[in-house]
Amino acid sequence: MQMEQKKTYINGKWINGTSKKTLQSVNPATGEVLAEIKENGIEDVKKAIEAAKHSFYITREWRDMDTQSRSDILLKIADMVEEKSEEIAKTESMDNGKPLREAEADVDDAVHCFRYYAGLIRTPQGGVYGVNSNFGRMHSYEVYEPAGVCALITPWNFPFLMGVWKLAPALAAGNSIIFKPSSETVLSVIKLFEIFEKAGLPEGTVNLVIGPGSMVGNYLAESRDVDMVSFTGSTAAGQSIMRAAAGNVKKIGLELGGKSPNIIFADTDLESAVEWAMIGIFFNQGEVCCAGSRIIIESSIKDEFVKRLAERAEKMTLGNPVDNPDMGPLVSEKHMQEVLSYVETGKKEGARLVCGGCRYTEGDCANGYFVRPAIFDECTADMRIVREEIFGPVVTIQTFETEDEAVSLANDTVYGLAGAVFTNDITRAMRVIREIRAGITWINCYNPAFSEAPWGGYKMSGIGRELGKHGLEEYQEVKQININLTPGAPGWYGQEVL
């Protein structure tokens, strides 16, 4: 791909950022610069906020559009994304490093997500109540309204899909938006905004700003003209967003880090558990917030499980993601070094490195950021590799003897994003899964996600939910309306109505 010059999108116009800094989008498989973008400065961010505010509160074209017309435009966007799916997926693969088939699946899911929310807003919402009170007979009902000016901030691991996870429901609800993707992966999102422009979204409804989260993200969170901020990323960054958003007590949604347990009992189908564990930790190079990075396994089957898992991991192919290897490169050289540093930490802590954990530089991978999938055995709960999110293809193994011990190990974390249980005893599966303090859980599988089902965590993995009807409600406010059905005015509270 020839290097391109890209722009950002504010108030219906493509502009160069004013920060005087140039962002380079790099192919992590080759080190090749794919595109350059002039980053936005604070003045650009102010203009984006003002455009969204004017769109929502003054012109009100998108906000006041009837739901059928708004739904039709979302369906049109879905069709346009589908038409460009091959181009978007290839761009995503080259910019992010994920295998092409995974990028294609992300784009397919994004199309479905737009169509899901286009349909959901055509269904009845709210409730009507006939109530009696000391004020007389009242009619009470609720209506859902858009939250307002929404700042949406997304990570680099699923740039297109997670962007759509936020944009589709936020647009469906009638909000005006400032969207800030991770600076690591911006190219597929730019293609989405090109589609927004062609689909005819009113000026100011969607605005794209690109720059560092420490500057752009915090400014959006602090702004009193932003009514809501939705953020997906690290827990530390989420805490910063939460503090900044306190200034005007704006609505917030946070989907943060994870260190998710994958509990495997001895009665499970071992080969199936191995395959799902591979998906749980090595899918998307392990750069997944809900990755099954802690395998907690019944001690009687641990050795055989680790043997099979290592055999599978050692056979995994690494290579240029557009050629569909088993794993592509990590997103950047900096992140690769962070993952490799955790591998060294695990060795020093006394865990046994069964396989992998080294940089891979053979053949065409010489200039890329590739790491062989790593498995650590003989891990203990106090180790950093067990407690901290690594966000790469590194998995730890812990053992248990009893069900209670398995649950205790699973919950021994500040995170609560995801978790899984593998067993042929469905009664035990349901019992244990209810004890795991996590928002997304699976039984005898790992990683499936659906637009129709809510997504989000407990504890330090965040607040609020993406996807499903809850995902739409995230970007709405609920208003209560009460109507007096009793003739005349009431007497003093508690007395008979006049």
Image (cartoon, rainbow, N blue to C red):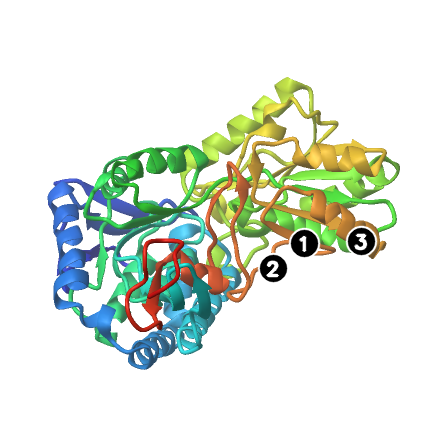
Disc nearer the start of the sequence (2/3): 3
Instruction: Quote the CA–CA distance across marks 2 and 3.
Output: 19 Å
- The secondary structure type at the circle numbered 3 is helix
Q: Is residue 28 above or below residue 173?
A: above
Q: Are marks 2 and 3 in contact (CB under 8 Å)?
A: no
Disc 2 crowd rating (10 Å Cα; few below 14, some 14-19, many 20+) is: few
- The secondary structure type at the circle numbered 2 is loop
Tell me the number on the disc at residue 271: 3
Q: Residue at x 29, y 81 (%)?
A: 69
- Residue 130, located in which quarter of the rendered image? bottom left
Disc nearer the start of the sequence (1/2): 1
The three-letter amino acid code for the residue at tag 2 is Pro
Residue 346 seen from this side: yes
The three-letter amino acid code for the residue at tag 3 is Glu
For label 2, the residue is: 448
In this view, the mark in front (3 or 1): 1
Q: Nearer the viewer, residue 307 or 210?
A: 210
Instruction: Quote the CA–CA distance across marks 1 and 2.
Output: 8 Å
Q: Residue at x 68, y 43 (%)?
A: 436
Q: Nearer the viewer, residue 307 or 279?
A: 279
Q: Are marks 1 and 2 in contact (CB under 8 Å)?
A: yes
Tell me the number on the disc at residue 442: 1
Disc nearer the start of the sequence (3/1): 3
Q: Nearer the viewer, residue 488 or 133?
A: 488
Side of 80 where 222 appears, left or right: left
| Image x and y of residue 409, in percent | 71, 32
